[in-house]
Amino acid sequence: MFDDETRAFRVVRNDEEQYSVWPVGRELPAGWSEAGKRGTKAECLAHVDRSWTDLRPASLRRSPSVDEG
């Protein structure tokens, strides 16, 4: 299913602002919501590459740095 290059996909994001692609028509896993892009798997992965520039979870990005003590 995820290897089918002709299938429509959508970009999804969780509360930690982590991205993934998910097939259109399949129910989203708990905690994930659409991020506004649909298309081929390649198009969606390209969107993820452009959008997800800091791979750290949002909670880690928001926490004070250990070095700031």
Image: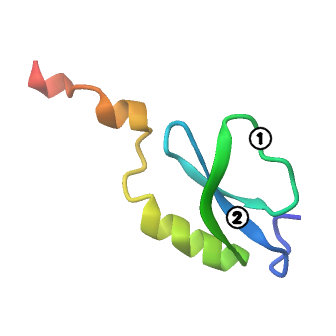
Mark 1 lies on a secondary structure that is: loop
Comes first in the chain, label 2 or label 1: 2
Percent x, y for residue 58? Answer: 41, 37
Task: Please tell me whether residue 48 is drawn above or below residue 8 in the rendered image.
Answer: above
Percent x, y for residue 63? Answer: 29, 26
User: Given the image, on which type of amino acid does mark 1 rest?
Assistant: Pro
Question: Disc 1 marks which residue?
Answer: 29
Q: Is residue 47 left or right of residue 44?
A: left
Question: Disc 2 marks which residue?
Answer: 10
User: Given the image, on which type of amino acid does mark 2 rest?
Assistant: Arg
Residue drawn at 45 percent across, 63 percent down:
51
Say few, some or many: other residues with alpha carbon within 10 Å of mark 2 (under 14 / 14 to 19 / 20 or more).
many
Residue furthest out toward the front: 36
Q: Is residue 40 left or right of residue 18?
A: right
Task: Please tell me whether residue 7 is drawn above or below residue 28 in the rendered image.
Answer: below
Residue furthest out toward the top: 69
Mark 2 lies on a secondary structure that is: strand
Q: Which colour assignment does the render follow?
A: rainbow
Percent x, y for residue 60? Answer: 36, 32
Residue drawn at 85 percent across, 74 percent down:
4
Residue furthest out toward the bottom: 6
Residue drawn at 85 percent across, 48 percent down:
27
